[in-house]
Amino acid sequence: MFLQLLLPFLTFSGVSAIKKPSSPSAELRDWKVDRMVDCIFCLDYDDYKGFAIAGCSVSKPMTCQGNACYMRQHKKSNYFLYTTGCVNLTSEEFESINKATAEEKPVAKKRGRETQLCEVLKDHLTCVCSNKDRCNNIANSDPFSEYSTDIFNHRNFDELRHFRYFLPEDPLLDYAEELGPMPHQNVYMMRTSVLSSSSLSPATAVTLILSFSFAHLFGVFS
């Protein structure tokens, strides 16, 4: 009898005995912590100073595996950076995304078919998907939903690993390690000044670009 009288009080007084999980994000409805998908792993970069890499438009791009894929473009006036890759979201991170999308309004009304979940902020645009292999192909025209708030909770997508793989001799890497943890976009903004004071000659830079391009053309990285 006492419990019957107490339950309505718990329900309507704002006290919750059991916290229900947020509704799963419709865009990531196929996501499971142990369900792996193949994701495209590539880098497009241009510092607008004569150094550029175009690795995301090749016929046989590299892939990596994770429980979700991402695409990410930085919106800066002094460089262009676009990366794609894989992430392994934890159940807690997935729940955080669900909570954010439940609390925030999308930019446009959803139609229920969206498979790309996108965060569009001042400095960057990031989309995450998990519905199929290579869902982060830039050529895809899959429907997406867009949020103008930080629904991914400042997640670090570790884009420096693209530089570690494709440009292992880049002075940017040594410089970033000396600085320690910091927003990656700040590291990229300093890249031009690092190169100008380093021993990396223009000829070496061109060689790196050409070797990267030809390796992709002949499927070395596939």
Image: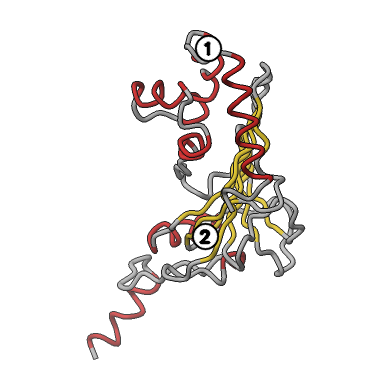
Q: Secondary structure at mark 2?
A: strand
- Numbered badge on residue 207: none
Which is more toward the observer, 103 or 120?
A: 120
27 vs 47, nearest the viewer: 47
Residue highlighted by disc 2: 68
| Mark 1 surroundings within 10 Å by alpha-carbon count, few (fewer than 14), some (14 through 19), many (20 or more) | few
Which image quarter holds the N terminus? bottom left
Residue type at the position of mark 1 = Ser
What residue appears at the point 48 percent right and 39 percent down from the top-left corner? 165
What residue did someone put label 1 on?
A: 193
Q: Is residue 16 above or below residue 207?
A: below
For the rendered model, the colour scheme is: secondary structure
Is the residue 52 above or below the residue 198 in the image? below
Gap between marks 1 and 2 measured at Cα: 35 Å
Front one among 165 and 180: 165
Picture layout, residue 220 above or below residue 99 = above
